[in-house]
Image (cartoon, grey):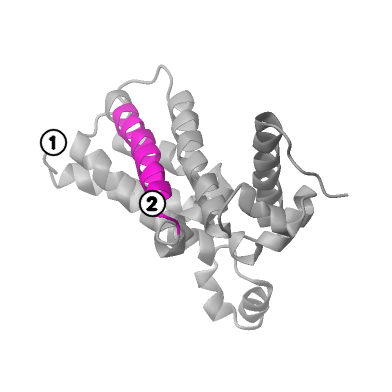
Amino acid sequence: MHRRARSPEAKLRRAEDLLDAARTLAADRGGVRHITLAAVTEAAGLHPSAVRRYFASKEELLLELAERGWRQWRDLLTAHLDGVRDLTPVGTATAVAATLAAQPLFCDLLTHVPLSLEGEVDIERARRYKTNSFEAYDTIVETLTTTGTMATAQVHDLIAAALGMTANFWQLSHPTPSLAELYAQNPRWGHAALDFEPRLTRLLQATATGLVAAGTPA
């Protein structure tokens, strides 16, 4: 039976139901690229025509999840490094990789945000995403700078590398069933389906070490 929200509280609850359904479907179907608004609304128990009361499009719904992902990463990282001081560049890179890897949906969405999501919503929704994600980003930079020995500019570069690597490596390490079968048939090609967290950690450690060795200005 489809449900209709008749109060602000119920409307908020229905929006959360849609977000929860999208999270579950993304996990069950191998990523956000495989979910549709129809499937999300059905899983949430809503009529397909009612979804636009809550989100104007699938892109807006997924962008909301990405925005929340930034806040969740911020909170996870600050909790992870609570009380830590004088962290080495390798330790800083390890913390970045570990806290990103702990959020599979966010890792997946990092590919789609610049590719389609933020460009397919209206300007005010894009503005809100930028405002809130950069607010979380600034806290992440401050946390990494105050807990470790890397300069602020080095931390900015490390995060830029982390986001780019994550967006690429996450997709490679979670191939579609047809690609997984292809890799099984052709092991030489299977190196592309790399193990996500170990590779991300190793390359971010090398990046952090290199940034410090190069003397990137503060």
Q: Amino acid at mark 1?
A: Ala
Q: Residues within 10 Å of mark 1 (few under 14, many from 20)?
A: few
Q: Position of residue 186 (x, y in %)?
A: 60, 83
The residue at the point 73 percent across, 39 percent down is 5
Q: Is residue 48 above or below residue 92?
A: below
The residue at the point 41 percent across, 16 percent down is 83
Q: Position of residue 90 (x, y in %)?
A: 34, 39
The residue segment tinted magenta is 121-144
Residue identified by numbered label 1: 218
Query: What secondary structure is the stretch in magenta mostly built from?
Result: helix
| Left or right, residue 131 beside residue 41 | left
At mark 2, the secondary structure is helix
As for residue 122 lying within the magenta part, the answer is yes
Of residues 2 and 112, which is closer to you in this image? 2
Q: Amino acid at mark 2?
A: Leu
As for residue 52 lying within the magenta part, the answer is no
| Left or right, residue 215 beside residue 52 | left
- Residue 28 seen in the figure: no
Check contact, mark 2 vs mark 1: CB within 8 A: no
Q: Residues within 10 Å of mark 2 (few under 14, many from 20)?
A: some
Q: Which mark is residue 163?
A: 2
Q: Position of residue 26 (x, y in %)?
A: 66, 56
- Residue 111 seen in the figure: yes
Q: Is residue 52 above or below residue 139?
A: below
